[in-house]
Amino acid sequence: MSAKNVGRILYSCPFVPMEWIAAHGLHPARILPGEAGANTSPYSQGTCSFLAGILDEIERDGDFSGAVFTTVCDQMRRAPECLHRAKSDRSFLLNVPSTWKTDASRNLYISELQRLGRFLVRSGGASPTSEGLARVMLEYDEKRTSLLSLRDKLDPRRFTEALANFHGSGDVEIEAEYIGYKRSGTPIALLGGPLTRSALSLFEVISMAGGHVALDGTETGERTLPRPFLRDKLEEDPLQEMADAYFGHIPDTSRRPNDDLYGWIDREVEARAIQGVILVRHLWCDNWHGEVGRLREHLEVPLLEIDLGGAEPVVRNRTRVQAFMEILR
Ligand code: SF4
């Protein structure tokens, strides 16, 4: 294990607070897989293509101290069992209750964070003091605010990459030459599950067809950011405040009820004058597949659904995206 990578904690789900890992003195490293898992992946049986890609990356990665999965869907719930024994022993399953509007479910999430904390200590970390946790939360909150302030000044792909890099390393690194981008074309929203690095070329396909991604509502984008931390609550009880900002606010299909997801979409579609929505989902992702019909009925703008399974999914869907953009003009 190289010194640089000692203490890396891998995760992929937005309900794992990166501050909690960092406050334990470890390095949160959210995975953005290069590719969705191919049909040939040993993990393709019973997992969505995204999770197969995640498991492929974890098996290839020798330099991590722990891997955290969550219960947001059946595929992810079974993920630790899919890994080989040596890596499975270093994994942790965080129970994220589907119901989220009750004190009981919120308390359960907090007790799960505490259990995760014990896993992080076993993985080489140290329990944070309240002051230490609050300090890390403030630091990450400021980084998120600075990232969001650049949203409309960056090429949409670079903004999503900057978010992914922040989640993967905790750093905000944007070269000055990329700031000042002027967005043009039909404003489009991306919505849905997580992207992969290779799927980022979708931004260029949309741009070449006369649009721009004015809203990245995929799991990789800004939809899954926690709300900003409230300073008075943070000083009072940082763990409760962190739980509320993540568990109490991130809209997702996995939540019951998930009406807040629709409220979030409506607000953002109106605020950014979105003309069409492209729903991105991984092959075998039941969560987003099950939402497509309801979304199509709900939205007042057209929706195109594309899947990210198989080889070169963006290339395979290029003509569909082009045709969709044509009807919006
Ligand atoms: S993409 Fe869908 S099925 Fe795959 S891990 Fe995410 S929610 Fe689960």
Image (spheres, rainbow, N blue to C red):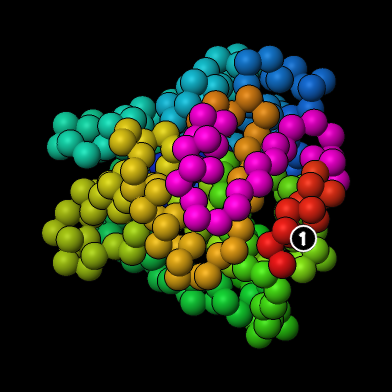
Q: Is mark 1 within 8 Å of ligand 1?
A: no
Would you say 45 lies left or right of 112 here? right
Is 12 located above or below residue 263 in the figure? above
Report the front residue among 285 and 11: 285
Is 85 located above or below residue 228 in the figure? above
Q: Which residues are magenta?
A: 288-316
- Helix, strand or loop at label 1? It is helix
Location of the C terminus by quadrant is: bottom right
Q: Residue at x 40, y 47 (%)?
A: 261
Classify mark 1: residues with Cα within 10 Å, few (<14), some (14-19) or many (20+): few
Residue 250 visible in this rendered orientation of the protein: no
Say how many tags the image has.
Answer: 1
Location of the N terminus by quadrant is: top right
Q: Residue at x 69, y 45 (%)?
A: 196
Q: Position of residue 288 (x, y in %)?
A: 54, 35
Residue 82 visible in this rendered orientation of the protein: yes
Is 270 located above or below residue 107 in the figure? below
Residue 275 position by quadrant: bottom right
- Magenta stretch encompasses residue 306: yes
Is 288 located above or below residue 6 in the figure? above
Q: Position of residue 71 (x, y in %)?
A: 43, 27
Would you say 144 lies left or right of 317 here? left
Report the front residue among 25 and 208: 208
Residue assigned mark 1 = 326
- Magenta stretch encompasses residue 277: no
Q: Residue at x 42, y 57 (%)?
A: 266
Q: Position of residue 69 (x, y in %)?
A: 49, 30
The disc labelled 1 sits on which kind of residue? Glu
Q: Residue at x 56, y 65 (%)?
A: 274
Q: Position of residue 153 (x, y in %)?
A: 61, 80
Report the front residue among 3 and 308: 308
